[in-house]
Image: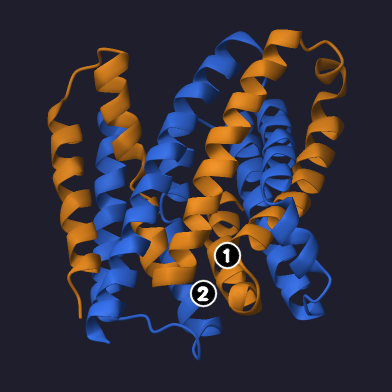
């Protein structure tokens, strides 16, 4: 369900964005995303929601700004310019950036698997990028 | 003409890399939230809500002009995109409730291949999926699996 959801999202947005700006598409998609996730969250975590600390909301706002005003908006921009398939291939390199940030800020080590994975991601993206 | 197409492609790739970086940064913020404040599902729901408030406020002018003239088809498709990504997030956390991340992560990592398959089926007139894109995406997915297992 998760892979299908993430996979189909880019295709739906590419199909729907033909007559609308990326800004409007981002906001409309967030309206439906909010409705679905809020419904699931209230269904599964009703009591937890009413016991959240004020500080939690500060972090939620930060996450919202980075992920949606930043991440989703740029992702949709990329989809509108280069297409859903190429954009998805590049955006799926997120774990690589997460690993780099973890090495820089959480002082994790670069192991063999991480090194090989990094090289493969760079090679794959290069293959997507260099085509005519 | 060809230079313009190249420039558009480079901008698109630059935005995609920036998006990947921001999603990674968001994973670090998410780790802090789920370690200290709430369950992942609640964190996602409220992050999306505040993301909607922020994005809606910043782009209010454009959205209020365009939304009035938007076709029903576009409303449905864009709405479905939002629902699909929300189902992705919900499915991710629901899966983590019943099994381990080492099982869930590799399955979810194949989503670019689902995008390519769906694009080749449903976006025929809009987008051309080349063999090179498919090969590149497969290599990226394998690389992501290596990174996942390596960290």
| Mark 1 lies on residue | A8
Q: Secondary structure at mark 2?
A: helix
Number of marks in picture: 2
Q: Is residue B27 left or right of residue A52?
A: left
* Residue in the foreground of this view, choosing between A68 and A45: A68
Residue drawn at x 18%, y 51% is A122
Q: Position of residue B113 (x, y in %)?
A: 41, 65
Quarter occupied by the N terminus of chain B: bottom left
- Kindly indicate the quadrant of the structure image that contains residue A100: top left
Measure the C-alpha gap from mark 2 to mark 1: 7 Å
Q: Chain of mark 1?
A: A
Q: Secondary structure at mark 1?
A: helix
Q: Is residue B17 left or right of residue B23?
A: left
Residue drawn at x 24%, y 58% is A125
**Residue extending furthest bottom?**
B125
Same-subunit check for callouts 2 and 1: no
Which mark is drawn over residue B118?
2
* Residue in the foreground of this view, choosing between B104 and B4: B4
Q: Is residue B123 left or right of residue A123?
A: right
Q: Chain of mark 2?
A: B
Q: Which chain is blue?
A: B
**Residue extending furthest front?**
B61
Residue B132 visible somewhere in the drawing: yes
Q: Is residue B24 above or below residue B106?
A: above
């Amino acid at each position: 369900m998760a892979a299908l959801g993430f996979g189909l999202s880019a295709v739906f947005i590419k199909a729907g964005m033909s007559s609308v700006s990326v800004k409007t598409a981002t906001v409309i998609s967030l309206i439906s995303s909010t409705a679905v996730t809020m419904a699931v969250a209230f269904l599964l975590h009703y009591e937890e929601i009413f016991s959240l600390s004020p500080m939690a909301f500060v972090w939620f706002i930060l996450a919202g700004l980075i992920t949606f005003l930043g991440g989703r908006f740029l992702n949709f921009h990329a989809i509108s310019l280069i297409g859903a398939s190429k954009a998805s291939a590049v955006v799926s390199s997120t774990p690589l950036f997460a690993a780099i940030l973890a090495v820089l800020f959480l002082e994790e080590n670069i192991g063999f698997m991480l090194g090989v994975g990094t090289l493969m991601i760079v090679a794959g993206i290069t293959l997507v990028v260099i085509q005519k | 003409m060809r230079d313009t197409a190249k420039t558009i492609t480079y901008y698109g790739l630059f935005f995609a890399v920036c998006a990947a970086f921001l999603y990674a940064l968001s994973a670090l913020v998410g780790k802090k939230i789920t370690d200290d404040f709430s369950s992942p599902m609640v964190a996602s729901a409220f992050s999306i809500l505040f993301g909607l408030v922020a994005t809606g406020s910043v782009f209010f002018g454009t959205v209020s002009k365009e939304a009035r003239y938007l076709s029903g088809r576009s409303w449905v498709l864009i709405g479905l995109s939002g629902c699909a990504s929300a189902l992705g997030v919900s499915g991710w956390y629901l899966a983590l409730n019943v099994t381990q991340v080492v099982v869930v992560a590799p399955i979810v990592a194949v989503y670019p291949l689902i995008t390519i398959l769906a694009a080749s089926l449903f976006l025929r007139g809009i987008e051309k999926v080349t063999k090179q894109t498919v090969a590149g995406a497969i290599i990226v997915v394998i690389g992501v699996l290596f990174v996942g297992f390596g960290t």
